[in-house]
Image (cartoon, helix red, strand yellow):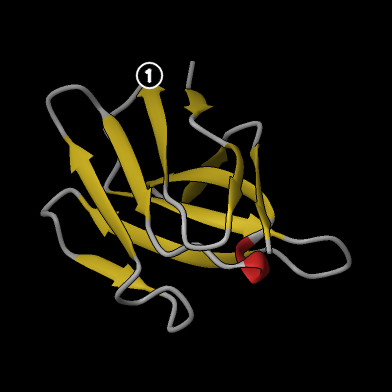
Amino acid sequence: QVRLVESGGGSVQAGGSLRLSCAASGSIFSTMGWYRQAPGKQRELVASITIGISATYADSVKGRFTISRDNANNTVYLQMNSLKPEDTAVYYCNAFLALRSYWGQGTQVTVSS
């Protein structure tokens, strides 16, 4: 059974940093990533990383966020620096394998100005 457990969300002032973690179990996933959804907006891709450690970022977070992956422990991380109020959202871990997509429960990130 696939399970994704997120941790690391919280509240921070603008310019601060947070690190999100997502521990996966039940399979080894070809791609893992983070999405976010702000109130009244659609869920959007923040960053993703393949098992071969090739990363993709949304333009809005390039240069500020870094995604990384520990394949041995089946964990993906999102280091978020220089946070802005517009980064406020629920962040969801995503894992993809064999045409199926799996989601974590979400973790709240709130950035105050």
Foreground pick, 89 / 5: 89
Q: Is residue 22 above or below residue 87?
A: above
Picture quadrant where residue 57 is located: bottom left
Left or right of 22: which side holds 72?
left
Q: Is residue 79 above or below residue 87?
A: above
Q: From the image, tell me which residue sits under label 1.
A: 25
Foreground pick, 71 / 79: 79
Residue under the point 81% across and 70% down: 41
Q: Residue 13: give x, y in percent of width and height.
A: 59, 53
Foreground pick, 28 / 8: 8
Could you tell me which quadrant the C terminus lies in? Answer: bottom right
Left or right of 87: which side holds 15?
left
Q: Is residue 89 above or below residue 73?
A: below
Q: Residue 93: give x, y in percent of width and height.
A: 50, 42
Picture quadrant where residue 112 is located: bottom right
User: Amino acid type of disc 1?
Assistant: Ser
Q: Secondary structure at mark 1?
A: strand
Residue under the point 39% across and 33% down: 21
Q: Is disc 1 surrounded by few (<14), some (14 to 19) or many (20+) residues within 10 Å? A: some
Foreground pick, 96 / 60: 60
Residue under the point 60% across and 64% down: 87
Q: Residue 84: give x, y in percent of width and height.
A: 57, 68
